[in-house]
Image (cartoon, rainbow, N blue to C red):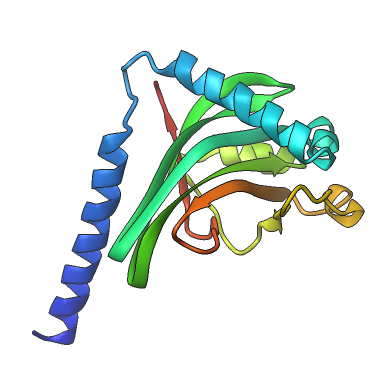
Amino acid sequence: MTYLNRRRVLLTGAAAAATALAACGNGIGSGAASMIDARVASTVSFMHDTYPGTQELSQRAAGRLVMPLVTEAGLGLGGSYGRGALQINGTTVDYYSAATASAGLQIGAQQYSHVLYFMTETALADFRRGSGWAAGGDLEYAVPERGEVLRAETITSLSPVIAVLFAQSGLRLGATLKGTKYTRIIP
């Protein structure tokens, strides 16, 4: 098998894995908005209670995207999928899915929650305007561990987008949002 054919097979397999994960939780047209809203409310409440520093982030942010549950799995080929809501001033304005596809040396599965805080109106507008938004290396991560308080420099950061990852469980170590594609959905 040539290098080009191997690469094509690998990319096709990664795309198929991402599609399979997305199909498992595709809420389009299913009336799932109330379920997403309930999960978002529970996630925000848990986050604020467990990591009090996130309350100030919520107050200062122009908006936040709450992804209550993202499931990630991989065995050579992998992917992740989750659904959540974009909130402005605590009110849901849109629903989004988050999906990734990956290939390489990987094995295991995990679930986690994350919230993207859009700290400027421009960052929020850029996110909402696009047909899809991919998380890149420009995100600042605030990963609280074992109930620790978020540091003051995280709260007062000048970064336009801050990601808070929490509630990780599973057999895979670490979570990153790099390469995650966020797409508006109609639940």
Viewer-closest of 175 and 26: 175
Q: Position of residue 48 (x, y in %)?
A: 76, 33
Viewer-closest of 113 and 130: 113
Q: Is residue 62 visible?
A: no
Q: Which residue shows up at 51% across the image and 50% down it?
A: 169
Q: Quick check: 61 above or below 39?
A: below
Residue extending farthest to the bottom is: 2
Q: Position of residue 99 (x, y in %)?
A: 40, 47
Q: Position of residue 168 (x, y in %)?
A: 56, 50
Q: Quick check: 175 above or below 56?
A: below
Viewer-closest of 175 and 99: 175
Q: Which residue shows up at 25% across the image and 54% down it?
A: 17
Q: Which residue shows up at 29% across the image and 65% down it?
A: 75
Left or right, 99 with respect to 151, comes to left
Q: Position of residue 127 (x, y in %)?
A: 59, 41
Q: Which residue shows up at 39% across the image and 21% down it?
A: 187
User: How many numbered badges does the structure rendering display?
Assistant: 0
- Which quarter of the rendered picture does the N terminus lie within? bottom left
Quadrant in the rendering for residue 183: top left
Quadrant in the rendering for residue 78: bottom left
Q: Is residue 169 visible?
A: yes
